[in-house]
């Protein structure tokens, strides 16, 4: 096994693939706000390895009704920490972009409202 193949395997084994991704908040004026501190809504994601070769890891990402593909180029010039952060940032960005580009604002708002209600045990009266 060559060095880059071993490095790719090492990165894959240490990715700590998340089961959910944080969602942004959509303000009343339509602006998008990424929450850094506080209560954050999350959407469940299913990440599976689709392809692995010497330089690339290709993942299939499934969430809600969507299925997307994410590629991670494993450069030996990047440290493991940088590659792992790159994977997590790409995953979050892919989910966010897919939901926003498909006008899933209502879904994002519902998830955020549900988490706030569950944290504070609030009941809505309609």
Image (tube, helix red, strand yellow):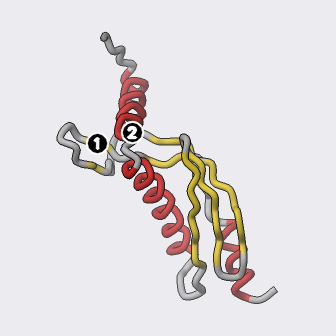
Q: Quadrant of the N terminus?
A: bottom right
Residue occupying the point 63% across, 58% down? 60
Q: Residues within 10 Å of mark 1 (few under 14, many from 20)?
A: some
Across and down, in percent, residue 10 comes to 70, 73
**98 displayed left or right of 67:** left
Which quadrant of the structure image shows residue 111? top left
| Residue closest to the eye, 17 or 99 | 99
- Residue sitting farthest toward the right: 1
The answer to whether residue 61 is left or right of residue 118 is: right
- Point out residue 21 in the picture as x, y percentages from the top left corner: 49, 49
Coordinates of residue 84 in the picture (x, y in percent)? 55, 68
Q: Quadrant of residue 121?
A: top left
> If you read the primary sequence from the N terminus, does the residue marked by circle 1 or circle 2 appear first?
1
**Secondary element at tag 2:** helix
Q: Quadrant of the C terminus?
A: top left
Which residue, given by chain and number where applicable, does mark 2 sit on? 108
Determine contact: label 1, label 2, CB under 8 Å: yes
Q: On residue 26, which mark appears?
A: 1
Residue at horizontal 64 percent and vertical 76 percent from the top: 56
* Residue 58 in the image: above or below residue 125: below
Residue closest to the far front: 102
From the viewer's perspective, is 70 left or right of 38? right
Q: Which mark is residue 90?
A: none
Q: Nearer the viewer, residue 58 or 74?
A: 58
> Could you tell me how far apart the alpha carbons at marks 1 and 2 are, in whole angstroms?
8 Å
Q: Is residue 42 above or below residue 47?
A: above
Q: Position of residue 35 (x, y in %)?
A: 32, 48
**Image point (62%, 48%), residue name:** 46
Q: Is residue 62 left or right of residue 37?
A: right
Residue located at (38% from left, 24% from top): 117
């Amino acid at each position: 096994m060559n060095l880059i193949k071993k490095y790719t395997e090492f990165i894959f084994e240490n990715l700590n693939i998340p089961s959910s991704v944080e969602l942004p908040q959509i303000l009343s004026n339509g602006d998008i706000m990424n929450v850094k501190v506080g209560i954050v809504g999350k959407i469940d994601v299913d990440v599976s390895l689709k392809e692995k070769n010497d330089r690339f890891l290709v993942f299939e990402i499934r969430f809600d009704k969507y299925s997307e593909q994410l590629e991670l180029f494993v450069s030996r010039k990047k440290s493991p920490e940088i590659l792992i952060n790159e994977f997590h940032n790409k995953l979050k960005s892919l989910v966010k972009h897919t939901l926003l580009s498909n006008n899933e604002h209502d879904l994002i708002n519902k998830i955020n409202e549900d988490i706030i209600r569950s944290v504070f045990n609030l009941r809505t009266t309609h």
